[in-house]
Image: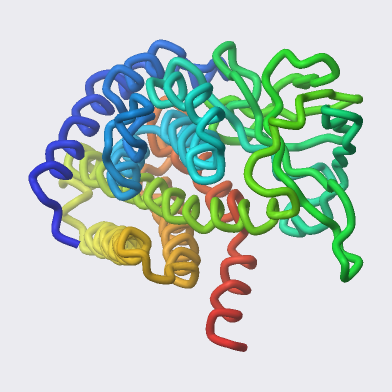
Amino acid sequence: MQLNDEYQALREAVREFAVESVAPVIGDFYERHAFPYDLIRQMGKMGLFGLPFPTEFDGEGGDYFALCLALEELARVDSSVAITLEAAVSLGAMPIHRFGTEEQKERWLPALCKGEKLAAFGLTEPGFGSDAGGTATRAVLDGDQWVINGSKAFITNSGTDITCLVTVTAVTGTNPDGSKELSTIIVPSGTPGFTVLPGYSKVGWCASDTHELAFDDVRVPVGNLLGERGRGFAQFLRILDEGRIAIAALSVGLAQGCVDESIRYARERRAFGRSIGDFQAIQFKISEMEARAHVARLAYYDAAEKMLAGRPFKKEAAIAKLTASNAAMDNARDATQIHGGYGFMNEFPVGRFYRDAKILEIGEGTSEIQKLVIARELDL
């Protein structure tokens, strides 16, 4: 996909923001496991949270590929900030845009598009990750209210001071074939019985917000049903297919960031009287890193192009996510090796990159799930 002037201008603007505003301060937030509210406000003013949404809801009128470009450039510098944007848009606001009523869109989307508020997507549960069909959270109709009981795990953007809602998948009945009827329900923050548990102590993404959620007889209006009753499974599959392209873009950003830092270090670091970049072993390693990032970028570009054209893209999204997350992990390992002992220090960006890379092979569908999706699309 050839970038037009608008895409290129967006890429350059986000790159400038990442280098000049994020890079100098994010290490401190990361070490303190603190959420960077000021950076999020700046991103909101830049319109990043509204990139793929219509202007009628205070969005930017762009598309999903624009979001992916922004994610890639942010992740070249830091993944905590990038995943905050990714989850806020593709998991938080997008379900409301895709499946919400006009009333729901008018109520929630403007603040989400401006980055003034964040939304979360409550799918994963403590006992059910890849097996989303094993959902145990239940919602029962009681008059004109849904009564929700259960829990969710590893939910991004769910406990910030500006989080306004979490969209929850829950069992709402039984289908004719005996399987669980899954539906999606909006639960506003602060609803009685809805508890946000303390944040996790994480290996990576330490400046992003992640919590376990508990629902104890949580009551919300029947009108908080998002989309059709019983279509929750199909809805979150659509959201995850799109989200995999976004995570692929984020992964490419991390992989490219590893290349950036390795080139910089190889030029500055001297050993045996020479810049280590003069040694063929280092040149070959960085060349392989660049090749991985390039191929992964082409994969997510291809998936995004098919998605925007309205063509089937499930297989391509899975390929992009699998390829890009592998590239991120491999590049983070190689960048750390190039940096030697300094690569093991958190003050160097590659230390954060190494810690952040692994989750990309797990979140929004593990690598094993991506292979399963690809195999099924090949009728295996």
Residue drawn at point x = 89 percent, y = 57 percent = 174
Toward the viewer: 73 or 335?
A: 73
Q: Position of residue 18 (x, y in %)?
A: 28, 28
Residue drawn at point x = 20 percent, y = 62 percent = 1
Q: Is 31 placed above or below 236 here? A: above
Q: Is residue 18 left or right of residue 190?
A: left
Number of numbered discs overlaid on the protein picture: 0
Q: Is residue 20 left or right of residue 139?
A: left
Question: Which image quadrant for residue 53?
Answer: top left
Q: Position of residue 79 (x, y in %)?
A: 44, 36
Q: Is 32 placed above or below 128 here? A: above
Toward the viewer: 129 or 20?
A: 129
Q: Is residue 356 left or right of residue 168?
A: left
Q: Position of residue 239 (x, y in %)?
A: 54, 51
Judged from this view, the residue extending furthest toward the left is: 5
Judged from this view, the residue extending furthest toward the front is: 143
Residue drawn at point x = 50 percent, y = 47 percent = 357
Residue drawn at point x = 38 percent, y = 29 percent = 49
Q: Is residue 261 visible?
A: no
Which quadrant does the C terminus fall into? bottom right
Question: Which image quadrant for residue 305?
Answer: bottom left
